[in-house]
Image (cartoon, coloured by chain):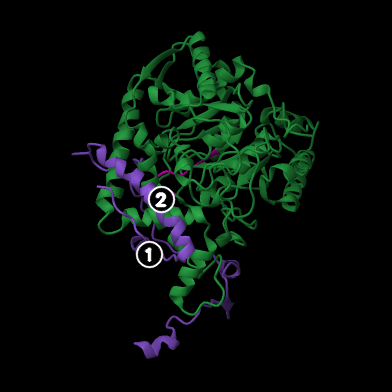
Amino acid sequence: MAEKIDRQEVQHVANLAKLSFDDQALSKITPQLEEIIGLFTDLQKVDTDGVEPMYSPTTEVNVMREDKGIRSNQREALLKNAPDTQDGLIKVPAIIDESEDGDK
Amino acid sequence: MSFYNTSISELHQQLVNGDVSATDLVKRAFDRIEETDDKLQAFLALNKEAALKRAAEIDKAGVADDQLLAGIPLAVKDNILTKGLTTTAASKILENFNPVYDATVVEKIKQAGAINVGKTNLDEFAMGSSTENSAFKTTHNPWNLTRVPGGSSGGSAAAVAAGDVLGAFGTDTGGSIRMPASFNGIVGMKPTYGRVSRWGVIAFGSSFDQVGWLTKSVKDNAILMQAISGLDKHDMTSANKEVPNWAASLDNASVKGLRIAVPEEYVSDKLDPDVREVVEAALKHYESLGATIDTVKMPHTKYGVPAYYILASSEASSNLQRYDGIRYGFRAKDVKNLDDVYVRSRTEGFGEEVKRRIMLGTFSLSAGFYDAYFNKAAKVRRLMANDFFNVLKDHDVIMGATGATTAFEIGSEVDDPTKMYFNDTLTVPVNMAGLPAMSIPAGFSKKDGMPVGLQIIGKQFDEQTLYNTAYVFEQTTDVHKRNPKLGGQD
């Protein structure tokens, strides 16, 4: 069941992954992904009927901790890593692009 | 002056006796780095001021008999968080990132008094087999400067092989400790999944990632591994298992009666003949010391690369969603709206290989493909793990080559991702099963003079047998006594 990976499919996956590829980058990555996904398709040859998928090698089970708040007081240090801040808060661009309002 | 021909135990004794100070050792490390790093490019950041300050504190307090790591200089792979010292994962997206806490493994060695001299280069987010995917620099192999050091822990491996430090942290998701150990003629251990906390280690493939050490000697590796192992309440996959003193019993180690399994696939004719020759000679050496060798079949080995690249890339695509340009890391300039922040920051911040993996993972997890790719790979993972468990039912260890080749030329594979992925054929299966495995120097290729690694794989949480087995080889051969001359200049 070889999947044909075309530019449109790559664009779709890029949208899901919040990445973008311009024409040139798309021309480079599309055949690469096609080749690698072609390799993936080899797995179809393996008989896995009745095999339980293995998502992790751990045998540990989830552990609960006491539900207790901890104050870390690291606001200033954390904010230093933010790309843009104002008044002790992280600053982001407008979430809704008003210039696009007319189109909607 | 390098750290060749010494050991943690020896330096410790010198510190206790007052023959050397922690400040001397830290200065020695920085002098050696200065001497070698123009050529090697192993370090992304040096921690000089803090390291000297810490050394002075240790010298003032004195080193007690039981403080084995106090005053010992070590290096840290740059995907492991170090408070107050930039941690980039060799990615532009984290170029100026300054962690507000230490990874558990860093905290543990700090508590033990070890001194972090700096952060080592890697493939961006540990995705690669050559360290060429670093956004900042290409690390060179100290045995031949035109060759790669392997990856992704290439900076750590080169630093240890060059005698900058006796030990450096690595992380291993699909071979990233063992492959560089093999390419640099040093010892690399990936412990059992769960043995070491992953808290504060920048996540790549969370069901595969483990922290371990690259060292010159087996005993140093065992000493350092003990210091970082054990349950951590911050990592629910860390195991509540007793941590043995692996180094303590090494001097009594023997391989008499050791049952070694050698999978056909790990010594096959797909290996470079010179690599195969060295590995087969190492196996014969074990046989001459009283071990028994059985040839076995591990038929799913060939599916390891596709299954691993589906699963690890899927986990990566999920783990790397956090890099969104909002709270920390790189944010693209002149963005108009929220979606723009995400898309442009990620597109400009991530390198090519990281984007490729995110795309592969997102594809494998996407509607319509999940069952055929992600879930199918998870089923193959189970079969691969069962192959190992079956063989290890009546064998103590599994042996074979770590890589099919010696270190390859810089630039020779970086534009061919498929070829690059197949370098990992013999290392990824271990991560599928979560088993402990190490690579030790087995010899040198006749053709190119480069180091060849022997891979030793063990049962879950049986690092002791691996260390014992490795130690016997080291102590009964001269392979480990050779040091690189750094491209011909000593």
Of all chains, the one bearing label 2 is B
**Residue at image point 37% right, 37% down:** B304
Give the overall secondary structure of the magenta segment: loop
Picture coordinates of residue B356 (x, y %)? 45, 54
Q: Name the residue: 51% across, 8% down.
A: B288
Span shown in magenta: B205-212
The type of residue carrying mark 2 is Ser
Which residue is drawn at the image coordinates 52% and 77% (left, top)?
Answer: B335
- Indicate the chain coloured purple by its letter: A
- Residue B181 % position (x, y): 57, 33
* Relative vertical location of residue B451 with respect to residue B357 in this rendering, above or below: above
Spatial CA distance of label 1 from label 2 is 18 Å
Chain coloured green here: B
Name the residue that disc number 2 marks: B313
Pick the front one: B28 or B229: B28
Q: Secondary structure at mark 2?
A: helix
Does the segment drawn in magenta span residue B210?
yes
Q: Toward the viewer: B480 or B361?
A: B361
The residue identified by callout 1 is A11
- Do discs 1 and 2 belong to a common subunit? no
**Mark whose residue sits in front, 1 or 2:** 1
Q: Is residue A70 visible?
A: no
